[in-house]
Image (tube, rainbow, N blue to C red):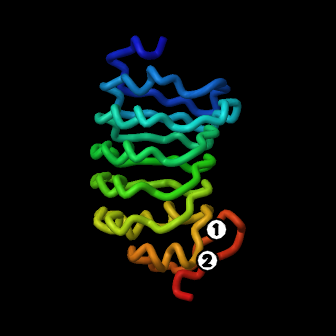
Amino acid sequence: EIGNLKKLNYLYLQDYPLTGKLPEALFSLSNLERLGIIRSLYMDKAQLSSSIGNLTNLKFLSLYDVNLTGSLPAELGRLSNLTWLSLEGNDFTGTVPSSYAGLINIECFGLSDNGLSGTLPPALANIKSFPQLWTNIVEFNSFTQEDIRKSKVPAPTSPKVKMLSGQELDIEA
């Protein structure tokens, strides 16, 4: 069982035919610094466990295109060592939790190609690299122009962003 690998600090599986759900024991591996599971299309649709917040040593987290659904867990905001977060290509819905402002070391913040909507938490603008990350959060989601206006976060230098519907959202309109 993966939960017995207490010294594991790196797990990366790309295009590996995993089935089922992410095992809960994965989130007890306190030495894990890098976790990447990429394009495991045979996995069952499932929510990302709030226990992800236990992996406080994580610096790299990529769960790209692995059939994750539901809300983004607020507990991810506790992972202040993260420099890379990629949750693109899943079926997350709802809003971006305000706790994500706690990701102060983040350099890559990929949430595109989900079903996210609503206003962005204003505290996200306090992340040093936020202006460069903006498009990777908003693109190919379900945000509306009204959502973006109400967000009170600085828009990117390029004001046009493609949305999940295929339409372009003109931030300056």
Q: Is residue 39 above or below residue 155?
A: above
Q: Residues within 10 Å of mark 2 (few under 14, many from 20)?
A: some
Picture coordinates of residue 40, whole percent (x, y): 64, 33
Picture coordinates of residue 27, whole percent (x, y): 41, 27
* Residue at numbered disc 1: 163
Quarter of the image for residue 120 reads bottom left
Which quadrant of the figure contains the C terminus? Answer: bottom right
| Helix, strand or loop for disc 2 | strand
99 horizontally vs 157: left or right:
left
Picture coordinates of residue 108, whole percent (x, y): 42, 54
What's the amino acid at mark 2? Leu
| Marks 1 and 2, how far apart at CA | 7 Å
Identify the residue shown where x is 70% and y is 30%. Answer: 42
* Residue at numbered disc 2: 169
Picture coordinates of residue 46, whole percent (x, y): 60, 35
113 horizontally vs 133: left or right:
right
Identify the residue shown where x is 43% and y is 63%. Answer: 133
Q: Are marks 1 and 2 in contact (CB under 8 Å)?
A: yes
Q: Is residue 67 above or below residue 137?
A: above
What's the amino acid at mark 1? Met
